[in-house]
Image (cartoon, helix red, strand yellow):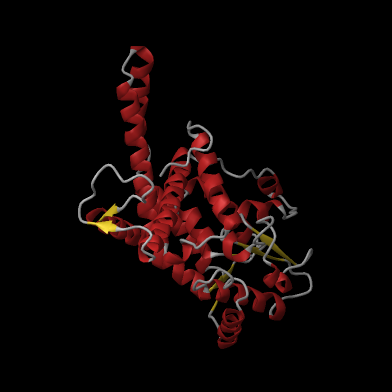
Amino acid sequence: MLVDTCVWLDMAKTPAQARNIEILAGLRNENRIEIIVPQIVLDEFIRNRTRVIDEYVKSITTTMSRAKEIVAQQRKGRRSKVLDRLLDQANSQIRTPRSVAEDAADQIQSLMQHGKIFPISQGMKVRAAERAMQKRAPFHRDKNSMNDALIMEAYGEVIKGQSKAKDRFGFVTHNHRDFSEPTGSHKVPHPDFAAFFSARKSRYYITVGDALGRMHLTGPNAWMYDNYEPPIRSVSDIANSIGELIDKVWYNRHKVREEQIEAKHIQLVDKETFPTPLGAVRPIQRDIWEGALKAAKRVEKRYGIKNMGPWDDFEWGMLNGKLSALRWVLGDDWDMLDT
């Protein structure tokens, strides 16, 4: 099984997925699975490890503080006092968020380092470059996707050149924009990668849970895998996803305004005056726009500019749909898309 870097990083910053890590470690120890690790994946994980741990710590700390704030606002009766006491106990008795995240990252890194690590060959680089020149996936979105291409080419080389007839393979990624069918189910690989997958030998997955669920295992510990259930998302996970979606929706709207300013459809002014003349496009105050440019740079640095679009109509609809759905889960009305 080749697990894309984004999946390992998501597992590291979501320790609630510890069950997935435990199952993968158990399967590896029983020699039922081998983790395929291109060197580029291990390097990317190590490079981003501290960042994802910090993000998890921040999300948990913020969630606990918000919970205590809500209880403090509702200081009425016995129930509020009980909740306040329980939160204090939880805050003092549970392991620190950093130790939890570091343990998860250590387990993942151990899994990878005990896997089948191999370097990126010159042949993989040539094939990836050919994809780029021909605008084939993952270069179909007009962005630098060389690392993604190298990971897929590495997977292709393993399944074609280093496998036995009885071997079965799985490629797992959360990056459906670059690897999945662009206008259909995300569970189907992009047509440009069709040669790497088949109904029997090589399968494509968008979650580790899907991959584990497809494995038919026997033996004394088979119950452990048969009873597998995907972990439930925590409130902090949902809140983090909402924050990321808000940033991306805002960023896209910002880029539209940037184009309109460059085209002179929107004017920059030193001081905005009111009211705006009837029928005129509202100008943007220069200092406010400079602040927006700085905010956009921070967003690009946080998520990586290659993950910030541009998106086609289908992708843009999915982005807003996800934001609306997640906000609904946390209590907002449907179609709440304010950023």
The answer to whether 92 is drawn above or below residue 40 in the figure is: above
Camera-nearest residue between 164 and 223:
164
Dividing the image into 4 quarters, which one contains the C terminus? top left
Residue 168, percent from left and from top: 73, 66
Total marks drawn? 0
Say which residue appears at 31% left-offset and 58% top-offset. 267
The answer to whether one can see residue 89 in this image is no
Which residue lies at the image location 46% right of the left edge and 55% below the top edge?
A: 12
Query: Among all residues in the image, which is located at the extreme front?
Result: 278
Residue ranking furthest to the top:
77
Q: Is residue 179 visible?
A: yes
Q: 284 or 227, which is in the foreground?
A: 284
Comparing 235 with 14, the one in front is 235
- Classify 249 as above or below 1: above
Name the residue at the left extreme.
270
Quadrant of the rendering where the N terminus is positioned: bottom right
From this view, report whether residue 338 is shown above or below residue 195: above
At a point 37% along the width and 22% down the height, the residue shown is 83
Quick check: 233 left or right of 208?
Answer: left
Q: Is residue 63 left or right of residue 273?
A: right
- The image position of residue 335, as x and y in percent, is 52, 38
Give the x, y percent position of residue 65.
32, 35
Counting from the top left corner in percent of width and height, residue 185 is at: 69, 55
**Quick check: 302 above or below 94?**
below
Question: Residue at horizontal 51%, vertical 64%?
Answer: 5
